[in-house]
Image (tube, grey):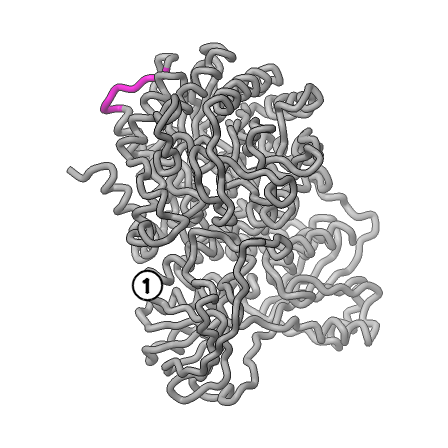
């Protein structure tokens, strides 16, 4: 019989090549074969609290959705209300730290914070009551996620700003700046955190919140205290790695009574050893974490947590140091943690584990379950008891209502980019969504479109995300809109971006774009003209009131010696025609951004080519969400794709490329995934200066693939302006500035709402 630990090891080892299984790929489609969804929309009881369906909104961080005292603002109230309106049964908030005055990383100068608070004073209660009452109005329950703190994964800028160190269970390196130590918390301070958690839970109950949710996974402070990877204490009460979590739950149970629901978020394993193997002994910032909690240890701990008072769990894998696991990006498989929830359910059933209320303990399935048929199947197969959706409810808060009504083709499907939901607040913003411009702006943009009082004749040129969003939104407002595109189908650059098998989420989104055009043509005054090239002359002759260009970018091939050889192709052309690589065995990809890395990954993992990637900058996939970047780099290395950073292309030969590479030992290791790239406005005073020691070298390649980006195609816009082709002329999306889907959809939506 295969052990639980072995099952987890086998699962994690499959994440780099799962897409060879066509059955798994089918699970990642937005289909409705299992309608009606009887399991998804059946009720479930947690302790004594009845939830109307099996759908949970996952805890998406609500950073900067509050004022600087931590009081939730109207943005947060509207954000949660929207999800309740969308039909989800249970909402969980983002993490709410309660260890102010102890965990230095959660506070800013002047005792301010970007985290919402429940503990500061009674002034924070009113908006929480408003949120709870609004959720209840639409039949949703809400749990508040209490976090004892961030510990070693907190912002180390507290050292620079306040001359105070981060803290942890033991002396641990800070995740963001490993040279900054996180100091050991005393037992006295840990007892204080427990008391604060109990008070926060009692305050939540008083504020009409339906339950509390302990943030015990991913390497945050609660995990650090309850996992021997981080808790290496030899003396005192909390040298017992289970003790802190159990005492915490007991305190909450004592303060809130036996019927108040307690939920616990936990990882079955950090899987650090499975991820990094021998590096766990050689990498300084990983060495201390080798003795991680095993799967059997976690299951025993969960059993004891139930005895202490926990009513429901959700379970995943990983931590910050392999961040693509707890935050599975687009390339991860559909339902990536169903095996994990299944293990827990098997263990609970085998050991007859019941909650203090005498119920079976529900286990929520997490991890890429936003595909209705897969979610229903998971419940029918008894792989889990509830379905937790995070990003799918940001991309479409009405996912539950649409699934219940069998309108699956109208769901805006998450593309797994994590640019708006995670990367935006890492860079300093608040949670949003790349493909739903209203997310995080529900307080500004109401669901109902303001109908125009001045109907305009509008032409939108380009059916990428910006153009489609703009055209459909303008048509819904009552304008007469014509959408023109040179391609047969909508999607723009996302057509090529959806070709690799790991880009199945983007394929779903492209289908949505085409479906939304079709529906808008049926229901509104929208005319769609694919396979059509727009010119200044024909646009001017139609007497439009408004012309909007969003026609993307022209891919670049630098005019270096050999740039026009037959063995040079654009990545976008290769993606559309894989046969361009069919007769080539050694391939050099120029450009280490998203397109270059994903193209290289396809060439290696799907076509078994020998691939090397050249990047001028020190880092590959810079400014991409840490989880997405980590996944790609980890599995590029796993597939033996060689990465050359700080390397400049000089010329292209018949059988390879000539480059100049900085071979200094100060050049960062391109394969590092256990530490993040800091935002450029954050100074790391411990960073070593990179020295220049360039060496010219040849890299053998019989095909050279260019993936260095493009220049905006803005000539049509400027020619239209010059010819006074319409009273109003706008330029949006990549043809304004090459960026991400996140910027494109926002520009199209905002413009259309204001025409």
Q: Secondary structure at mark 1?
A: loop
The single residue placed furthest to the left in the displayed view is 1
Residue 728, image x and y in percent?
A: 81, 63
Residue 733, image x and y in percent?
A: 66, 62
Q: Main secondary structure of the magenta part?
A: loop
Observer able to see residue 40: no
Q: Decide which of 686, 573 is in the foreground and name it.
A: 686
Residue position for label 1: 639
Residue at 52% of width from left, 74% of height from top? 692
Quadrant of the rendered image containing residue 219: top left
Residue at 39% of width from left, 65% of height from top? 601
In the image, is 15 to the left or to the right of 481?
A: left
User: Compared with residue 544, is residue 471 higher up or lower down, i.e. above or below?
Assistant: above
In the image, is 721 to the left or to the right of 63?
A: right
Residue at 39% of width from left, 12% of height from top? 357
Write the start and end of the magenta stretch as one range. 349-355
Q: Decide which of 163, 128 is in the foreground and name it.
A: 163
In the image, is 109 to the left or to the right of 576?
A: right
Residue 261, image x and y in percent?
A: 47, 18
User: Compared with residue 129, is residue 485 higher up or lower down, i.e. above or below?
Assistant: below
Residue at 67% of width from left, 53% of height from top? 746
Q: Decide which of 56, 106 is in the foreground and name it.
A: 106
**Would you say residue 235 sits in the magenta stretch?**
no
């Amino acid at each position: 019989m295969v052990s639980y630990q072995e099952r987890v090891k086998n699962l994690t080892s499959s994440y780099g090549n799962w897409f060879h299984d066509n059955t798994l790929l089918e699970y990642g489609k937005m289909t409705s074969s299992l309608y009606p969804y009887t399991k998804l929309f059946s009720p479930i009881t947690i302790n004594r609290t009845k939830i109307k369906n099996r759908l949970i909104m996952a805890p998406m961080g609500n950073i900067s959705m509050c004022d600087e005292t931590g009081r939730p603002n109207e943005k947060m109230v509207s954000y949660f209300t929207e999800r309740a309106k969308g039909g989800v049964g249970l909402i969980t908030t983002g993490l709410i730290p309660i260890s102010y005055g102890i965990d230095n990383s959660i506070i800013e100068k002047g005792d301010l914070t970007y985290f919402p608070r429940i503990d500061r004073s009674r002034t924070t209660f009113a908006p929480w009551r408003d949120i709870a009452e609004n959720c209840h109005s639409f039949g949703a329950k809400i749990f508040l996620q209490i976090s004892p703190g961030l510990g070693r994964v907190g912002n180390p800028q507290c050292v620079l700003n306040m001359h105070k160190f981060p803290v942890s269970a033991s002396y641990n390196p800070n995740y963001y700046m490993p040279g900054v130590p996180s100091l050991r918390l005393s037992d006295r301070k840990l007892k204080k955190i427990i008391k604060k958690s109990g008070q926060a839970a009692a305050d939540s109950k008083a504020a009409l919140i339906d339950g509390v949710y302990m943030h015990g996974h991913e390497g945050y402070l609660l995990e650090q205290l309850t996992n021997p990877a981080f808790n290496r204490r030899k003396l005192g009460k909390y040298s017992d790695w289970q003790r802190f979590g159990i005492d915490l739950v007991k305190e909450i149970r004592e303060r809130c009574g036996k019927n108040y629901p307690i939920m616990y978020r936990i990882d079955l394993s950090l899987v650090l050893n499975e991820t990094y193997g021998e590096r766990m002994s050689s990498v300084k910032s990983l060495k201390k974490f080798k003795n991680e909690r095993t799967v059997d240890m976690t299951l025993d701990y969960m059993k004891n947590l139930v005895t202490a008072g926990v009513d429901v769990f959700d379970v995943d894998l990983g931590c910050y140091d392999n961040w693509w696991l707890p935050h599975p990006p687009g390339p991860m498989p559909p339902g990536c943690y169903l095996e994990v929830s299944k293990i827990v359910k098997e263990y609970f059933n085998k050991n007859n584990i019941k909650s203090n209320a005498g119920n079976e303990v529900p286990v929520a399935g997490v991890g890429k379950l936003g595909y209705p048929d897969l979610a229903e199947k998971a419940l029918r197969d008894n792989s889990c008891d509830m379905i937790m959706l995070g990003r799918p409810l940001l991309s479409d808060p009405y996912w539950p209502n649409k699934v219940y009504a069998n309108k699956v083709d109208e769901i805006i499907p998450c593309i797994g980019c994590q640019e708006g939901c995670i990367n935006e607040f890492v860079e300093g913003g608040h949670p949003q969504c790349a493909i739903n411009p209203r997310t995080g702006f529900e307080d500004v943009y109401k669901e109902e479109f303001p109908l125009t009082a001045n109907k305009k004749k509008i032409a939108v040129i380009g059916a990428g995300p910006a153009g489609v969003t703009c055209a459909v939104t303008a048509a819904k407002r009552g304008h007469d809109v014509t959408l023109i595109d040179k391609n047969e189908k909508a999607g723009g650059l996302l057509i090529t971006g959806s070709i690799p098998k790991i880009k199945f989420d983007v394929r779903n989104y492209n289908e949505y774009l085409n479906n939304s055009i079709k529906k808008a043509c049926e229901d509104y005054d929208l005319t769609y003209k694919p396979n059509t090239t727009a010119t200044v002359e024909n646009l001017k002759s139609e007497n439009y009131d408004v012309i909007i260009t969003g026609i993307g970018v022209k891919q670049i091939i630098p005019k270096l010696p050999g740039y026009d050889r037959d063995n040079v192709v654009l990545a976008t052309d290769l993606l559309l025609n894989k046969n361009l690589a069919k007769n080539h065995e050694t391939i050099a990809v120029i450009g280490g951004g998203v397109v270059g890395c994903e193209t290289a990954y396809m060439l290696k993992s799907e076509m078994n080519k020998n691939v090397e990637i050249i990047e001028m900058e020190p880092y590959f996939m810079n400014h991409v969400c840490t989880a997405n970047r980590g996944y790609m780099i980890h599995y590029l290395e796993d597939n033996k794709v060689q990465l050359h950073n700080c390397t400049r292309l000089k010329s292209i030969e018949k059988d390879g490329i000539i480059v100049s590479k900085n071979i200094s030992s100060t050049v960062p290791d391109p394969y590092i995934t256990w530490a993040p790239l800091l935002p450029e406005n954050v100074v790391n005073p411990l960073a070593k200066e990179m020295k220049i020691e360039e060496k010219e070298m040849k890299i053998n390649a019989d095909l050279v693939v260019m993936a260095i980006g493009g220049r905006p195609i803005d000539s049509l816009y400027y020619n239209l302006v010059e010819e006074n082709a319409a009273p109003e002329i706008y330029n949006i999306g990549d043809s304004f500035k090459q960026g991400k889907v996140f910027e494109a959809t926002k520009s199209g939506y905002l413009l259309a709402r204001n025409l």
